[in-house]
Image (cartoon, rainbow, N blue to C red):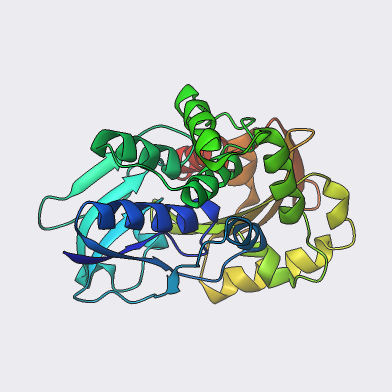
Amino acid sequence: MKMYVCGHTNPDSDSICAAISLSYLKNQLGDEATPARQGDINPESRFILDKFDIEEPILKTAYKNENLFIVDYSDLAQAPKDIKEANILGIVDHHKLGDITTPTPLECWIRPVGCSNTIIKEMFDYYKVDIPKNLAGIMLCAILSDTVIYKSPTCTEEDIKATEELAKIAEVEDIKALGMEMFLVKSAVKGATPRELVTRDYKDFDMSGKKVGIGQLEVVDLSVFDDMIDDLFKDMEALKEEGDRHSILLLLTDIINEGSKLLVISDDESLIEKAFETKLENSMSYLPGVLSRKKQVVPFLEKIFS
């Protein structure tokens, strides 16, 4: 069966690498699968693809009457605009179950692990399909990215096991050194526009009828943002108005000191303060220990908005 495999809007490394790895698996199993993406490739993902000499997924944002296997999301807010007119064949995801529905049964692999590529690694094992060296490399990097080199509270024993096995296939001797090399690329923000930074790893969420956008920038040193805060706020304000959003949040995450500076533009800042039990000063607050949008941010906001 001919299909496309594609992740969410504003794709991160997991979405990009999952589209590639799952397409390869599907092709090995007899389907005709093409990896796709819903947006530009960010610097980290570009580094990963170049390092392991992998071709990027095609850019495709419309899927009317097409067969589609989605990876790394199940929320309508992160889907193509015509998703309801696509034939969704399956989902691989590691987030909460979203609001995408289908008129017919579908294949679902949804697990509470740190990365979609961890699940795809388990699918390779289940179907007894060998993983090529370069594909193992990008899958390894995706897991390191999503788990923040094992520091994220979303990281599980399954993720660590997967990286160890993938590293052997990819002939990567020092897993954490590769992770730090990747995050140094991710930390390079000089020369990027405020819009590129705000939306580099950004997702919209429907929270009880209110649209809330949450972006995250993971770096090894928060000082890189010292001269950018005002410009980031201005772009967040513009993005909020453009999409008629209730709130825009941006997490500036320090992976070394394990915490995030939170920037907020909102119709009601008190809701954000209640969600994180913090006090915003100049629409900012520091959240110690917060590394994961999925586990430490979204659930607390959804509880308050509900």
Q: Is residue 44 above or below residue 144?
A: below
Residue 188: x and y in percent read 78, 59
Q: Residue at x 40, y 61 (%)?
A: 77
Side (left or right) of 50 relative to 88: right
Residue 28: x and y in percent read 26, 53
Q: Can you see residue 125?
A: yes
In which image quadrant can residue 175 be found?
A: top right
Q: Residue at x 22, y 69 (%)?
A: 86
Q: Report the front residue among 90 and 281.
A: 90
Q: Is residue 10 above or below residue 73?
A: below
Residue 82: x and y in percent read 29, 74
Residue that lies at the very extreme toward the top in this rendered image: 157
Q: Report the front residue among 204 and 133.
A: 133
Residue 288: x and y in percent read 73, 31
Q: Report the front residue among 302 and 200.
A: 200
Q: Residue at x 74, y 47 (%)?
A: 181
